[in-house]
Image: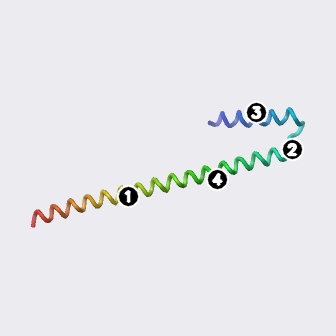
């Protein structure tokens, strides 16, 4: 993954140097904006993933507790 990103950056930098002796500031700002957008999207996706995992875990825990309580209540009624 890192190698692919580095190859893309080297490709972009090589392509920019072919056209210009010194690439304009716009190229740097575009790269920074793309990296910021990537970080924001990645954070949002991870937030959604962790929220769903936490919610699923809480539901599973509640279901296990409810099932164990119903079994305990059933045993208590049989003993009485």
Asked if the residue at tag 4 contacts the one at tag 2, i.e. Cβ–Cβ closer than 8 Å, the answer is no
Residue topped by disc 4? 40
In this view, the residue farthest toward the right is: 21
Q: Relative to 6, is 25 on the left or the right?
A: right
Q: Residue at x 70, y 35 (%)?
A: 6
Q: Which mark is residue 24?
A: 2
Is disc 1 surrounded by few (<14), some (14 to 19) or many (20+) residues within 10 Å? few
Q: Can you say whether 31 is above or below 77 in the image?
A: above
Image coordinates of residue 63 in percent, x first then y, are: 32, 58
N-terminal of the pair, mark 2 or mark 3, is 3
Figure label count: 4
N-terminal of the pair, mark 3 or mark 4, is 3
Image coordinates of residue 55 in percent, x first then y, are: 43, 58
Q: Relative to 46, is 38 on the left or the right?
A: right
Q: Residue at x 36, y 55 (%)?
A: 60
Residue topped by disc 3? 11
Query: How far apart, in angstroms, are the residues tagged by discs 4 and 1?
Result: 29 Å
């Amino acid at each position: 993954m890192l190698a692919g990103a580095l190859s893309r950056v080297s490709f972009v930098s090589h392509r920019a140097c072919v056209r210009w002796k010194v690439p304009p500031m716009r190229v740097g700002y575009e790269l920074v904006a793309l990296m910021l957008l990537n970080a924001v999207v990645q954070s949002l996706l991870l937030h959604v993933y962790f929220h769903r995992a936490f919610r699923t875990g809480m539901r599973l825990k509640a279901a296990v507790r409810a099932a164990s309580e119903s079994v305990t209540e059933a045993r208590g009624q049989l003993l009485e």
